[in-house]
Image (cartoon, helix red, strand yellow):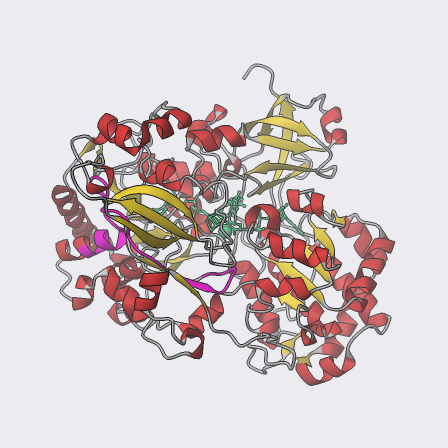
Amino acid sequence: MSGKRNKISRRRFIDLGVQGYAGLQLAHLAPAALLPFSGCHPQHTKTVHGVCYHDCPDSCSWEVTLEDGKIKDFYASKDNPFTNGKLCGKMETFPWDVTFHPDRILYPLKRTGQKGEGKFEKIGWEQALKEIAEKLKESVTQHGGESVLPFGYMGTQGLLQKDAMSKRFFAKLGASNLEETICGSTAITGNKLVNGQVIGVLPEDIVHSRYIILWGTNTKNANVHLWPFVLEAKKRGAKITVIDPFKSVTAIEADQHIQLMPGTDVALALAMMHVIINEGLTDNDYIEKYTEGFDALKDHVQQYDPATVASICRVDENLIVDFAREYAMVKPTLIRYLIGMEHNYNGGDAFRSIGMLPSLTGAWREHGGGLMHLTYELFGEAFNFNRLNLYASLSEKETRWLNMVQLGSLLNDPELSPEIKTLFVFNANPAVTIPNQNLIRKGLEREDLLTIVLEHFITDTAQYADYIFPATTQLEHWDVADSWGQVYVNLNQPAIEPLGESKANNEFFRLLAKEMDFKEKCFDEQDMDIAKSIFETDHPYMKGITFEYLKKNGWARLKIQEPYLPHAEGNFGTISGKCEFYSTSLEGSGQALPDYKIVPLNNPDQYPLQLLTVKATKNFHNSSHANIEHLLEAEGPATLDMSYEDAHKRKINDGDQVEVKNENGSVLLIAKLRNRIRQGVVLMPHGYWPSLVKGKSTSNALTHDLISDHGGGAALQECRVEVIKSENL
Ligand SMILES: Nc1nc2c(c(=O)[nH]1)N[C@H]1C(S)=C(S)[C@@H](COP(=O)(O)OP(=O)(O)OC[C@H]3O[C@@H](n4cnc5c(=O)[nH]c(N)nc54)[C@H](O)[C@@H]3O)O[C@H]1N2
Ligand SMILES: Nc1nc2c(c(=O)[nH]1)N[C@H]1C(S)=C(S)[C@@H](COP(=O)(O)OP(=O)(O)OC[C@H]3O[C@@H](n4cnc5c(=O)[nH]c(N)nc54)[C@H](O)[C@@H]3O)O[C@H]1N2
Ligand code: SF4
Ligand SMILES: [Mo]
């Protein structure tokens, strides 16, 4: 099978309906979900609850209506106040876009062509598993368990299919561990260094705020179900400021947009502190009772005076002063940050310094005041993780950790001991989403590397696989969803039988465990039983929320005591229980206080423009859905935002084709001159599949695998490029 895309149009696909599609593509399978409705039987209608699987702060609840086992309707939960009756545009037609898509992989495949060529033939499950197990056993004997790297990420963030069974499998095998750092790690590490935890103000409580700062987050696009709460706050009189080097769709709607240079947020936050402290706008009582290290911070911020920082951030000095004053004086004030600015070399310190601001001004005291970041810790407290954590007892010894951000370097490093010989990819598309795309491709081309991919589609990563296994979608398997952006728990029930020969990730690892002769009983455990075990808890947040309740109702809000003011009286998650302005854990490293550090980059003269590659697409979710015809069409070809100054200097006009290039690669794009980016910076959306665009390269062909200051994250926005007009490509 080749990676060619079926040209059936979206409209036509809907017209044909699932029944027609079954006739065209899957008649020989006749799975229950696709059987045409027969008038001979009485209709049996039922509704099944589910939840969106995407790595998204919103974790929306949905319902599927079935008639005689066939999907009739798919829609957002109307009752769940956070989902509020609406899925985002990229998920509204999910069953037809993904589950029933004609390109969906429905059988195991084995490579027949060259690596990357995308040529495969069908193979039976039994045979494929046997072959893999044999190769795996041999490889582990020869090179050790650590020569196996599981590259599983958040393609589904459900607690079951993300890694419940795979963790057991790889622990037993003694494989290398993957440091999952591409998203959140740097942000979390930065915030935790100061506050000890990332839970702060609850999402809905933003309505109580009177000054909202959306700092490096594109709420309207990336966190769409929070946006109505922001608008409600605005209606109640709140001012909205967005801090972003790009005039994002969120920045366009804000009352104020501070368009600083990328990666300079830490300097801005330190300058705000300079003003707040020196002008006596601090809450001294709060500082005294609930914080540590104030004197050291006070001395430290003196070097970050507004004039100096104005030249670093390239914003007006008076704007910094006014912004700091307003932040300190309006009450309640809330800072919302999420992920965006962590992908900088100074990302960790940005999250750290901004995370200090609410304690300086005592913003935490009020309902709707403080910091809003991530909510997953609440579920960590509430759920029973015993069975999910069981994998730890299967490891015979501690095995090495490899950072996912550096996959390209790792695959190409002959000095790595042991070398990576087997790569399992599931819930991820690293050939598109991980920095240094060309190095990753080169690694995936290695003849001595066994690559196994579990997927829905032949992605750009799957094209390099030796074996591809068909994974089920969220409509076909069990899962349990916590959330990192809201406080609702969801149980996802399978609405239909798995299509074709697809199997859930967990089932793949259960079967492979058998083939590997793993005898432990935990490899027999079924998904529904693991799901049940998660709810075996008497934590007050889960009062009345049982497996049975969720089976009937789908979702429930954690029973959190209201109003939730986590730090009104300190209670930080640090060892001292205080907000730590000075990080004693980093004492002696020169990093006990946050700093603006110069980025170690090569060739700034040859490549004078800083490239941002961000999740600015409305219709893709990272690289997911970027192969779905109507979504790709709605998104249009990938563009490059440039300032008029930078474009004119290069004789580039709006709509011209341009080549963006540096030492890592080159990407073809359409220039967009619309005054949304500063001189010296260019921006392109991330997510497009190389195989589906002109030039066969996308954003991460240009990015480096440089690591951020804290948490091991990817400093992928520290990328310098040149742009030229590309006439004849
Ligand atoms: N439509 C859509 N929604 C998504 C996703 C998607 O791919 N598509 N992905 C989901 C995922 S995985 C995540 S992690 C979340 C992320 O959601 P967000 O945290 O909102 O992250 P991003 O959209 O990456 O970036 C937000 C903004 O940060 C800005 N930014 C970049 N560098 C800097 C900087 O140095 N300083 C400041 N102040 N701002 C900077 C970018 O210009 C961008 O507008 O979104 C989720 N939601
Ligand atoms: N340049 C640049 N790069 C970035 C970012 C950026 O802003 N700029 N953002 C980064 C961020 S924040 C993130 S989170 C990462 C995300 O990067 P990835 O985790 O690679 O996310 P996706 O591109 O969505 O790929 C997920 C894959 O999982 C598959 N999948 C979904 N459900 C299942 C399942 O049940 N089983 C199996 N086996 N597969 C499944 C989907 O089909 C999809 O191909 O990208 C990062 N990369
Ligand atoms: S991607 Fe996010 S906003 Fe869209 S349906 Fe899924 S959880 Fe909701
Ligand atoms: Mo992410």
Query: Toward the viewer: 696 or 70?
Result: 70
- List x then y, in percent, for residue 480: 35, 61
Which secondary structure dominates the residues rendered in magenta? loop
Q: Quadrant of the C terminus?
A: top right
Residue at the spot x=76%, y=50% of the render? Answer: 255
Q: Is residue 332 left or right of residue 512?
A: right
Left or right of residue 655, residue 66 in this image: left
Q: Residue furthest bottom?
A: 289
Residue 441 in view (yes/no)? yes
Q: Nearer the viewer, residue 471 or 203?
A: 203
* 692 is higher (above) or lower (below) than 54: above
Look at the picture and state if 406 lies above or below 686: below
4 left or right of 339 in image: left
Q: Is residue 492 part of the magenta span, yes or no?
A: yes
In the figure, 168 relative to 381: above or below?
Answer: above
Front-lying residue, 677 or 235 = 235
Q: Residue at x 13, y 53 (%)?
A: 515
Counting labels gives 0
Furthest-top residue in this view = 728
Instruction: Please state the horizontal and vertical placement of residue 113, each as a whole percent of the image.
Output: 25, 28
Quarter of the rendering occupied by the N terminus: top left
Question: Which contiguous range is marked in magenta?
Answer: 483-510
| Front residue of this view, candidates 690 and 381 | 381
Mark yes or no: residue 343 visible. no
Residue at position x 26%, y 50% from top?
Answer: 504
Residue 564 percent coordinates (x, y): 58, 74
Say which quarter of the image contains residue 94.
Answer: top left
Residue 668 versus residue 173 in the image, above or below: above
Give yes or no for residue 144 being in the magenta stretch. Answer: no
Residue 611 x %, y %: 62, 39
Quadrant of the rendered structure where residue 68 is? top left
